[in-house]
Amino acid sequence: MVLEFAVSDRSSVGLEWELALVDADSGTLRQVAPAVIDAVADDVRHRYVKPEFLRNTVEVISDVRRTVPEAIADLERGIAAIHDATGPMRVDLMGAGTHPFAHWSQQKVTDKKRYATVVDRAQVVGRQQIVYGVHAHVGIEDRAKVLPIVNSLLVYLPYLQVLSASSPFFGGDDTGYASMRTMIFQQLPTAGLPYQFGAWSELERYVADMLHTGVIDDFTEVRWDVRPAPHFGTVEVRICDGTSNTLELAALGALVHCLVEHLSTLLDEGRPLPTMPAWFVHENKWRAARYGTDAIIILDDAGEEELVTDALPRLLTTLEPVAERLGCAAELDGVREIVRRGASYQRQREVARAHGGGPAALEAVVASLVAELHAGRPLPAAA
């Protein structure tokens, strides 16, 4: 089969942010996404608000933009529209990789054929997907660049996963993971790490085989952590947990934006892109999900290792000139703020400890996540 790759402007950018709808008083999930979508239908900002897999979830999306700040502004317009609709419902928005105490058995799937297919095929694994993520699209002007960039981005996934990790709690328990969302989502049949294809024809063969055997109905059902998005002409990075505030979201978006442009420039200059064996990529993903900022990651195909927070400053130094060109230097610097304040999973555990543990503590965690969304930045834990 032929898998067409759409035309897009180089390093154009788009962001997608999945958010939970929670009760303003108790913090429990509310199944009101259809009502929210209906309420914003006549609002000019409705273009930034979309339904998602579960009825407790809405997604805010940006238009195709030149810079991360422009994309963030679109997301803020969508959030404002949602808040206007949810205020009378006593519903608020929460950003994280998982809801701390909701149980999957009580959640309802959005009435859409593709979502029903996921549950029918994956069964209990499909119904357990009370997870929320951030996706970043970056435009690629030449299809020949797509797979080399996808393969090289796998080296940098642990940085993104650690910085965004925001799902230590699931079903009322501390899972011991920084990103439990990662472990849950990768159980879906076509989710997880991508294959490292060397040629576009290999990807086309994969898609043809998946279609022929009925695994997928179209390529959008391939839910890899990093994937080509042929219908948009982009590379899409999907590894990040949902974030609680726009400062961190902008930092993650800037990091993705700069990484893709950096790798594209290396290709232009005829220089090799960093890669590593699939088994190292797999191990890095697990370490980042389990240990967060305490993860010792594998740096290269030689198997050299380093604490992720020690390796991160070198990466930021490399990307700073790229950020200047892309108009996101301040946003990229937000990565340092995440490390300084602690990633979301660390702040959530701090809030839970400050409130003594137990169900009431997890309600306080939800309240802190809601507060961070309103503030647009990380907040200190308060007893």
Image: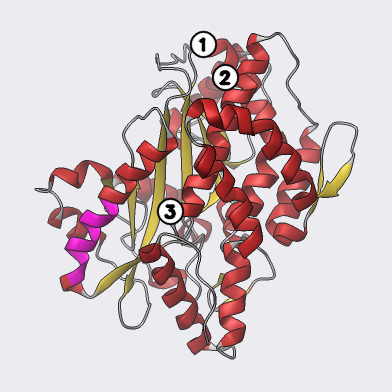
**Image position, residue 238 (x, y; %):** 53, 42
Q: Nearer the viewer, residue 339 or 107?
A: 339
Residue 184 visible in image? yes
Could you tell me which residue is drawn at 46 percent across and 61 percent down? 377
**Image position, residue 311 (x, y; %):** 78, 45
Q: Which residues are magenta?
A: 78-87
Q: According to the image, label 3 marks what residue?
A: 246
- Asked which secondary structure carries label 2, the reply is helix
- Asked which secondary structure carries label 1, the reply is loop
Q: Does 234 appear in magenta?
A: no
**Image position, residue 186 (x, y; %):** 60, 49
Above or below, 140 relative to 134: above
| Amino acid type, label 2 | Val
Query: Which dot marks residue 142?
Result: 1
Above or below, 174 relative to 361: above
Eye-nearest disc, 1 or 3: 3
Query: Which dot marks residue 19?
Result: none
Callout 3: 10 Å neighbours few (<14), some, many (20+)? many
Residue 51 visible in image? no
